[in-house]
Image (spheres, rainbow, N blue to C red):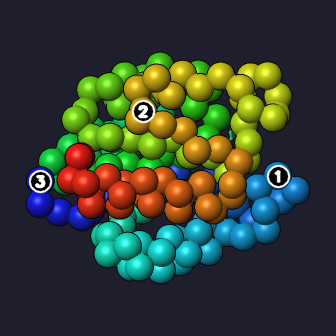
Amino acid sequence: MNNRNFLVINGPNLNRLGKREPGIYGAQTMEDLQTELVLFSKELLLDLSFEQSNNEGDLIDLIHGAENKFRGIVLNAGAYTHYSYAIRDAIASVDVPVIEVHLSNVHAREEFRQKSVIAPVTIGQISGFGFDSYKLALQVFHNQLKGDTL
Ligand code: DQA
């Protein structure tokens, strides 16, 4: 595929960024995240699209719809990360590489957050670096494009 289109998908409650548990997730909003990522993606010459949904089925449809459109997906599935076999199966069903990201370090939090049911079907997980988690994921996709290994 000859494009540089990547999709960032945010799952449930991430539309509450800035208001939601700022001690854990920071004071910046979803809009701030998009602004930062658009700037960063311009440096990398990537084309970014953004989606957010609080609904499992919508997230599944977004993953299915990414096939043949996007070179990769940066996915923060929120709490679905820890128990949605349906999202895991959606990722496994498409030929699009997914990087799992988290703002917080899920491994340093409650026990239920330490398990990701989607991690085995992603190409990797980046957790604990705030907005930089997303940027690191984009950097990985960019590096892979350079090697054209995607
Ligand atoms: C999160 C971590 C999840 O455990 C939590 O349910 C979220 C956000 C993160 O970005 O740190 O909604 O994915």
Q: Give whichever of discs 3 and 1 has the lower sequence position.
A: 3
Disc tally is 3
Q: Residues within 10 Å of mark 1 (few under 14, many from 20)?
A: few
Confirm or deny contact between disc 3 and disc 2 (CB under 8 A). Answer: no
Q: Give whichever of discs 3 and 2 has the lower sequence position.
A: 3
The residue furthest left is 2
The quadrant where residue 16 appears: bottom right
Give the secondary structure at mark 3. Answer: loop
Label at residue 122: 2
Residue 104 on image: x %, y %: 73, 47
Query: Residue type at mark 3?
Result: Met
* Residue at x 48% of width, y 37% of height: 124
Query: Residue type at mark 2?
Result: Thr
Q: Give whichever of discs 1 and 2 has the lower sequence position.
A: 1
| Residue sitting nearer the eye, 48 or 21 | 48
Give the secondary structure at mark 2. Answer: loop
Query: Residue type at mark 1?
Result: Ile
Q: Which residue is mark 1?
A: 24
Q: Does any atom of ligand 1 lie closer than 8 Å to the CB of label 1? A: yes
* Residue at x 69% of width, y 58% of height: 130
In this view, 96 is above or below 110: below
Residue 55 on image: x %, y %: 50, 40
Tell me: 104 left or right of 134. Answer: right
State whether residue 65 appears in this view. no
Residue 77 on image: x %, y %: 54, 40
In this view, 31 is above or below 124: below
Give the secondary structure at mark 1. Answer: helix
Q: Which residue is mark 3?
A: 1
Q: State the CA–CA distance, disc 3 to disc 2.
A: 20 Å
Q: State the CA–CA distance, disc 3 to disc 1.
A: 38 Å
Confirm or deny contact between disc 3 and disc 1 (CB under 8 A). Answer: no
* Residue at x 53% of width, y 77% of height: 35
